[in-house]
Image (spheres, helix red, strand yellow):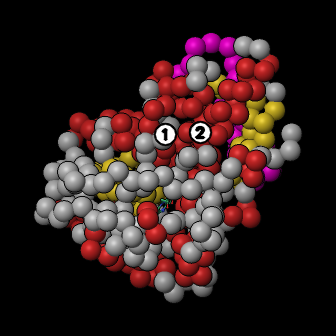
Amino acid sequence: MSPQLDAAVLERAVRLALRAPSVHNTQPWRWRLRQRQVELHADLARHLPGTDPNRRDLVISCGAALHHLRVAAAGLGAAVEIERVPAPENARHLATIRLVDGPPDRSAAALYGQIGRRHTDRRRYSSEPVAPERLDALVARARGFGVLALPVTDPAVLQRMNEVLHLAAREQRHEPGYLAELLMWTHRYADARDGVPPMAVPARSGQWDQPHLQRFPSGTLAPGRNLGADGGTLLLLATPQDDTAARLAAGEATSAVLLSATRAGLATEPLSQAVEVPVARKRLRTALGLPDEPQLVIRLGLPLPDAAPLAPTPRRPLASVLLRP
Ligand SMILES: Cc1cc2nc3c(=O)[nH]c(=O)nc-3n(C[C@H](O)[C@H](O)[C@H](O)COP(=O)(O)O)c2cc1C
């Protein structure tokens, strides 16, 4: 490709990567476009210390953006190679992505069309359970990043897990700074390009079976018709280690699971309170009998038949997230 075409592909891919999910829609990333390569940096000014004391969500959000970039590049016909955590002494520099010669990654390209279709769906899901083959396919996607995805389907384990989710929600309220961050990121100015807008949060009556696990204040999203119990599944993502590279991989797996689930017609919602509160995260491991490090919970299920399409949440423009070359 010509240098102009390379630059155009990379810029377009970064624009699409901005659609990635992030904790409280903080979009904690910065990008540096160079010739034939782009760098991904964490934006520590957007860290939420009261919510995410260990910066886990921040790095997972960046990992999701990295995978979105990879999908976008493949969908635009470009092959890339990725160097993760290239300078460990620089905590912000998370990855360098280089254009290389060769065919694009076909399995990543297959998810291209889902970037604009994926949205966090906090509403109640259909009572129809997710088919085991679909869950298996999502587990395989996560495994491609060295990440364990564990669907919690055993009723006894699910009950223990729900207890931990409730513990986390209760404990987190007492964390200094938590509530202030929640208010700040759900009450942006009308023209803000970040944060969680009320239209992305169901009105109280439209929330899923466990309203106390809904962390955001009641919003304006219309509920679907309630047709019985919520048949959604909780999927836990976990990694063998808990360093920056492991969290970045968990973020890439998160994006891969969310985009693949979207392609399969499933609604998805990341849930991070149980991994943000240290005591809950510890109990999660015991409850599930896991040697691995819990990184994120994802709720997924079939949308209710009459669920209206979700509107996209805002994103900051490219110019606001670019670092100088
Ligand atoms: C690491 C991470 C943690 C998140 N935690 C939660 C959560 O606990 N509850 C929730 O409703 N949404 C959660 N989300 C979803 C974000 O709020 C959502 O991605 C963001 O508001 C942008 O909206 P979108 O996903 O519809 O594009 C999380 C997302 C990420 C990446």
Crowdedness of circle 1 by 10 Å Cα count: few (<14), some, many (20+)?
A: many
| Mark sitting earlier along the chain (2/1) | 2
Q: Residue furthest left?
A: 228
Q: Is residue 87 left or right of residue 215?
A: right
At horizontal 73% and vertical 61% (from top left) the residue drawn is 44
Q: Which residue does the numbered mark 2 point to in the structure image?
A: 16
At horizontal 78% and vertical 21% (from top left) the residue drawn is 4
The kind of residue tagged 1 is: Ile
Quadrant showing the N terminus: top right
Q: Is residue 244 magenta?
A: no
The stretch in magenta equals: 82-105
| Residue toward you, 179 or 239 | 179
Q: Is residue 238 left or right of residue 33?
A: left
Instruction: State if disc 1 and disc 2 touch (CB < 8 Å).
Output: yes
Q: Secondary structure at mark 2?
A: helix
Q: Is residue 291 left or right of residue 157?
A: right
Percent position of residue 312, x then y: 48, 52
Q: Which residue does the numbered mark 1 point to in the structure image?
A: 115
The kind of residue tagged 2 is: Leu
Percent position of residue 21, x then y: 52, 52
Q: Is mark 2 within 8 Å of ligand 1?
A: no
At horizontal 59% and vertical 68% (from top left) the residue drawn is 190
Q: Residue furthest right?
A: 325
Question: Does residue 152 lie above or below 215 as drawn?
Answer: above
Percent position of residue 154, x then y: 20, 57
Per the model, the C-alpha gap separating discs 2 and 1 is: 7 Å
Could you say which disc has been placed on residue 126 in the image?
none
